[in-house]
Image (cartoon, coloured by chain):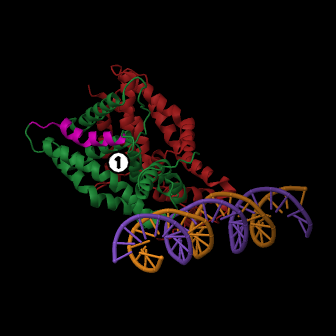
Chain colours: A green, B red, C orange, D purple
Amino acid sequence: MPLHVNSSGSTKERILGAAEVLFAQRGFDGASLRQLTAAAGVNLAAVNYHFGSKDKLVEEVFRRRLDALNARRLEALAKIAGASGTTLEDVLAAYIRPALELSHDDSGSLFMRVLARAFAEHDDSLRQFLSENYGHVMRQFTAEFARLLPQLSKPELYWRIDLVTGALTHAMSGFGMIQRKHDVSEQVHREQTAQHLIRFAVAGLSHP
Amino acid sequence: MPLHVNSSGSTKERILGAAEVLFAQRGFDGASLRQLTAAAGVNLAAVNYHFGSKDKLVEEVFRRRLDALNARRLEALAKIAGASGTTLEDVLAAYIRPALELSHDDSGSLFMRVLARAFAEHDDSLRQFLSENYGHVMRQFTAEFARLLPQLSKPELYWRIDLVTGALTHAMSGFGMIQRKHDVSEQVHREQTAQHLIRFAVAGLSHP
DNA sequence: GGCTGGTTCAAACGATCGTTTGAGCATACG
DNA sequence: CGTATGCTCAAACGATCGTTTGAACCAGCC
């Protein structure tokens, strides 16, 4: 196992970057502060000095990415929500595309995997943190889905959104077998992925 | 935190039962052998005596459930595969219903959550174990999907199966907000869940 | 220079981890 | 009876964990 030393940015940023990588690879429990600080090229005590504890570091890893991600989602949603010509595709694109761009960004490519781990670990305190800080995002999207799918009962709509969420989390965390081919560019692959996800989600949400 | 002592069955079975519960609750790393053996009401050394190591215990937890689960899936698939009147619904039911029955079984209710954790943890050795022992199941189902969806290209089909898998794993591990209402029986709820999953999967697989 | 506040450092803390040990116990067989 | 055999037990092993400590460093300011 190579010991990668990240030497750019402040100590805090180097810790956050290394934490994202190692949390994605080994999980929150599996990644130790000693591995993490070694990879970041900082002293072991720096984590507790700058973040207070390992748990607070985990929260900061989420906050750094999710603040930007959900802001872009809401920004995209605001442009189309409530309008008369809005389609399901538009709403789904507003939700999916910011996540796809993040997940294909160099520095954030592993974050969706970290997020999927957080879902799989039924850690109550982490779920509460996510719900408190970002629950309003899902609520706004749900409201717009309800407007565009008036024929669905509330339980029926929740069911479908739940299943779509599972599919997207699964896909964006790179669980699947689908890999980018060598002969297509990053940009083209991202667009193909977005099209697949959106068409799939539209079919799953709107079937009779 | 209550310390539950399971006193039925052999030492091996008690360990397996307690391991399933604790692995689902705290993850494979998070659940310690001391918590586990205390919950099972057995001595700490019993795990290494009967299973050799904690990793081997993890494999046995999977083997015990997946052997039965996938046998029932293949049995159900064999009854319909290749026949002329077979529908997508039939194939999906063969895949989903055995898992749903397991996930709502008293003694196996937490196993799907354990399975979802295994997906989220990108542990290579565990993935290799699952692929070696149960990869042929997914291959048989994929072949039948390909037969019933001849209009889809191979990459397109793989994409859709991947997304359906994500949705089902998500739903069956109980991530979502959908809970059984108090006024519907266990059996009715299971049937409703199966119908939701199957209709959703049909729509996701077969949309134009 | 001296001093201060923020930061980094090596070292140690107590706790908990998976695993091993060797004695003790029970049942079955000669 | 004696003695294997399979299993359980308390205790300990070394390793690793998150966290804390107190000294060292290092800018900027008087």
B36 horizontally vs B109: left or right: right
Give the quarter of the image for residue A152. Answer: top left
Give how far across and how far down residue B56 sits, in percent.
62, 50
Per the image, the residue denoted by label 1 is: B190
One can see residue B176 in this view: no
C30 horizontally vs B20: left or right: right
> Quick one: A18 or A164, which is closer to the camera?
A18
Give how far across and how far down residue A43 sits, in percent.
52, 61
**Above or below B180: residue D26:** below
Q: Which residues are magenta?
A: A85-103
> Which residue type carries mark 1?
Arg
Q: Residue at x 52, y 34 (%)?
A: B135
A176 horizontally vs A91: left or right: right
Report helix, strand or loop for mark 1. helix
Label 1 chain ID: B
Q: Residue at x 35, y 29 (%)?
A: A189
